[in-house]
């Protein structure tokens, strides 16, 4: 009776292990297909980042300093 239980347990665990190995292989194949095939057919559009450096004016700095001094009063 104990021997039959061990055989059934070994067969069950072997089945689960085999399924997990097949699933991992399928995930690797899917990753390869998505990375190499789908990205070539439908490339993702990367938006351009336009950064215009705005020079600060001395009057803006003076107004900011004056505003902080008024708030402290």
Image: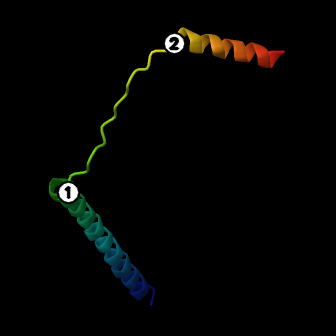
Residue at 75 percent of width and 13 percent of height? 69
53 relative to 3, above or below: above
Q: Position of residue 73 (x, y in %)?
A: 84, 15
Q: Where is residue 45 in the image (x, y as percent from the top left)?
A: 26, 48
| 5 to the left or right of 18 | right
How are the residues colored?
A: rainbow
Secondary structure under the numbered disc 1 in the rendered image: loop
Q: Do the residues labelled 1 and 2 touch (CB within 8 Å)?
A: no
**Mark 1 to mark 2: distance in Å?**
45 Å
Q: Where is residue 29 in the image (x, y as percent from the top left)?
A: 20, 62
Local crowd size for mark 1, using a 10 Å CA cut-off: few (<14), some (14–19), many (≥20): few
Residue at 45 percent of width and 90 percent of height? 1
| 67 to the left or right of 5 | right
Q: Which residue lies furthest to the front in this view?
A: 59
33 relative to 70, above or below: below
Which callout, 1 or 2, points at the residue further toward the start of the chain?
1
Q: Where is residue 26 in the image (x, y as percent from the top left)?
A: 24, 67
Residue at 58 percent of width and 15 percent of height? 60
Which residue is tagged 1?
42
The quadrant holding residue 50 is top left
1 relative to 41, above or below: below
User: Which disc, if any, is residue 57?
Assistant: 2
Local crowd size for mark 2, using a 10 Å CA cut-off: few (<14), some (14–19), many (≥20): few
Residue at 63 percent of width and 10 percent of height? 62
């Amino acid at each position: 009776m104990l021997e039959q239980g061990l055989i059934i347990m070994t067969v069950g665990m072997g089945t689960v292990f085999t399924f997990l190995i097949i699933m991992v292989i399928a995930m690797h194949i899917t990753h390869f297909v998505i990375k190499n095939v789908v990205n070539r057919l439908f490339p993702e559009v990367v938006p351009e980042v336009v950064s215009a450096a705005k020079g600060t004016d001395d009057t803006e700095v003076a107004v900011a300093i004056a505003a902080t001094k008024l708030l402290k009063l």
